[in-house]
C-alpha cells in the first residue's frame, strides 16, 4: 500500500515550511535550524548567507540569529534545511542609534559609504559583517579612531503584516559576546575555499580586503 498524500493541503499554514537542500535556497532567505554544529541545544531561525575569507574565497552556510550572538555556520550545498517561505523586512530602530565600537548583533551603518550590515561572529579572527543588500559576510574591522560607525537595534517582520515580528535584536542585547576559543584562534586559511571553481555563481569578490 502506498501512503496517501493529499495534493492540496487541508490546513493552510503561513509561513510555509519546506525541506530543501542548501543549494536550492537563495541568499537572504530564512531557514529554521535545530541544534548548532557546536552542540548548542537551541533551535531558531537563520538567514541563508555566504562567507568570504580575506582572500575572497567562499564558504556556503547560514547566519544563525538565535542562541546568543548572531554567527555564521557553514553548511554543505547538499545539506537539507527547513526553508521558511515568507517575505520579510529588516527594520532598523533609528531611535537606538549610537556611535560606539561594534558588538556582535549590532546593525552597523557607515555614514561614509551608506553600507548597512549585521555584525556577526564566524570563521574569521574577530568579527564579520553580513551585508544586508547581498547576504554575503566578510571579515570586519572596527573603524579607525577618526571614523564614525553607527550601531542600531533591529528586527525582522513579515512584509505583508508588519505587526508579525519574526526576530528582535534589542539595543540592550547588543553586547560583546566572547568568541569561542577554537573560533577566535582559527586562521583565515581554514575557511573552505570554493571561489576559484565557482566563479560563474555571480557572488562578488572584494578586492582590498587586506585593508580592512
Image (cartoon, helix red, strand yellow):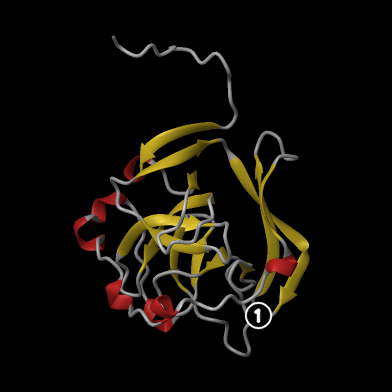
Residue 73 appears at what percent x and percent y? 41, 60
Q: In the rendered view, would you say 135 is above or below 162?
A: below
Q: Quick check: can you spot residue 7?
A: yes
Q: Residue furthest top?
A: 1
Residue at 47% over, 79% down: 126
Residue ID for mark 1: 148
Task: Identify the residue at horizontal 68%, vertical 72% (top origin).
Answer: 150
Q: Is residue 77 above or below residue 132?
A: above
Dividing the picture into quadrants, the one containing residue 6 is: top left
Q: Is residue 98 left or right of residue 49?
A: right
Q: Is residue 3 left or right of residue 145?
A: left
Q: Residue furthest right?
A: 95
Q: Where does residue 32 sit, x and y in percent of width and height?
A: 50, 44
- Tell me the crowding category of disc 1: few under 14, some 14 to 19, or many 20 or more residues within 10 angstroms, Cα based: some
> Residue 21 at x, y = what percent?
34, 41
Instruction: Identify the residue at the far left of this view.
Output: 197
The spot of residue 116 in percent (x, y) is 58, 63
Residue positioned most to the bottom: 145
The answer to which quarter of the image holds residue 42 is bottom right
21, 194: nearer the viewer:
21
Amino acid at each position: 500500500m502506498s501512503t496517501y498524500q493529499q495534493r492540496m493541503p487541508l490546513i493552510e499554514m503561513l509561513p510555509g515550511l519546506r525541506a530543501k537542500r542548501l543549494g536550492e535556497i537563495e541568499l537572504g532567505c530564512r531557514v529554521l535550524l535545530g541544534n548548532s554544529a557546536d552542540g548548542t541545544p537551541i533551535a531558531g531561525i537563520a538567514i541563508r548567507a555566504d562567507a568570504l575569507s580575506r582572500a575572497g574565497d567562499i564558504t556556503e552556510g547560514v547566519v544563525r540569529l538565535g542562541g546568543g550572538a548572531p554567527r555564521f555556520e557553514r553548511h554543505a550545498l547538499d545539506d537539507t534545511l527547513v526553508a521558511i517561505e515568507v517575505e520579510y523586512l529588516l527594520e532598523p530602530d533609528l531611535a537606538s542609534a549610537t556611535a560606539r565600537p561594534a558588538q556582535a548583533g549590532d546593525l552597523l551603518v557607515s555614514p561614509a559609504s551608506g553600507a548597512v550590515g549585521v555584525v556577526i561572529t564566524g570563521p574569521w579572527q574577530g568579527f564579520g559583517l553580513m551585508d544586508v543588500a547581498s547576504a554575503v559576510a566578510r571579515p570586519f574591522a572596527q573603524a579607525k579612531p577618526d571614523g564614525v560607525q553607527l550601531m542600531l537595534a533591529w528586527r525582522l517582520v513579515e512584509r505583508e503584516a508588519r505587526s508579525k515580528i519574526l526576530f528582535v535584536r534589542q539595543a540592550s542585547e547588543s553586547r560583546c559576546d566572547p568568541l569561542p576559543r577554537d573560533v577566535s584562534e582559527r586562521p583565515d586559511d581554514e575557511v573552505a575555499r570554493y571561489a576559484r571553481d565557482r566563479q560563474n555563481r555571480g557572488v562578488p569578490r572584494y578586492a582590498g580586503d587586506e585593508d580592512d
